[in-house]
Image (cartoon, rainbow, N blue to C red):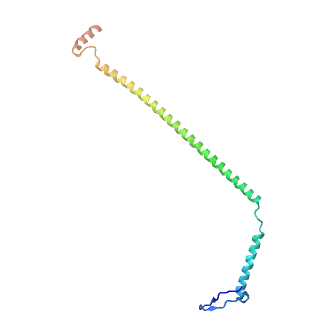
Amino acid sequence: MIWNRKAKGPAGDPVDAPADIEALDPVLKQALGEFKASVRAWSDDAYSRPRVTRETVVRKRKIAVGWSFAAVLLAGALSGGLYQRHHQDELAARIAAQRAVEARRQADEQQRARNAQTDEEVLASVDKDLSREAPSAMEPLAQLGDEGESQ
């Protein structure tokens, strides 16, 4: 390896670069040699690894499709269950509302029946209090007539 540029020294002065790797520092030469050896070992290892074949890829795709299908089935089952539960809750709420309406209607009918009975009793007592057999001016004569009949 030959360098065409001139290297600079610590003071910034141009220094002639070595024309060959043999002239380099032995520590640097050893480090470069070890780096070269590690790169070659890595390359040999990478090239000697078994390659992924089409069958392996197809098998992995089948597994992925199977898991995807299982996930879709699970999601469908869960959403169906949740929908069914929601539907049952809604139906139970409707039934409870209908029962509450029916109970309220029955309570109103009972209250009307009690009010009607009370109204009738009140009207009967008013009728009894207001009704007389004879006007108030004729009452003494009516009492005399009652005494004569009882004898």
Question: How many numbered marks appear?
Answer: 0
Give the residue displayed 33% in from the left and 22% down from the top. Answer: 125
Task: Return the x and y of residue 31 as percentages of the image width and height.
Answer: 71, 83
Q: Is residue 126 above or below residue 4?
A: above
Q: Residue furthest left?
A: 137
The image quadrant where one finds the N terminus is bottom right
Q: Is residue 120 above or below residue 90?
A: above
Q: Is residue 141 left or right of residue 35?
A: left
Q: Is residue 12 above or below residue 102?
A: below
> Which of these two is toward me, 71 or 22?
22
Q: Is residue 151 visible?
A: no
Q: Name which quarter of the figure residue 44 lies in.
A: bottom right
Q: Is residue 105 left or right of residue 39?
A: left
> Which of these two is toward me, 126 or 53?
53
Give the residue displayed 62% in from the left and 47% down from the top. Answer: 78
Q: Is residue 97 above or below residue 4?
A: above
Give the residue displayed 29% in from the left and 20% down from the top. Answer: 129
Q: Name which quarter of the figure residue 52 lies in.
A: bottom right
Q: Is residue 70 left or right of residue 97?
A: right
> Which of these two is toward me, 111 or 97?
97
Q: Is residue 60 visible?
A: yes
Task: Return the x and y of residue 139 as percentages of the image width and height.
Answer: 23, 14
> Which of these two is toward me, 132 or 110?
110
The image quadrant where one finds the C terminus is top left
Task: Return the x and y of residue 41 as percentages of the image width and height.
Answer: 76, 75
Task: Return the x and y of residue 28 as percentages of the image width and height.
Answer: 70, 85
Q: Name which quarter of the figure residue 46 lies in.
A: bottom right
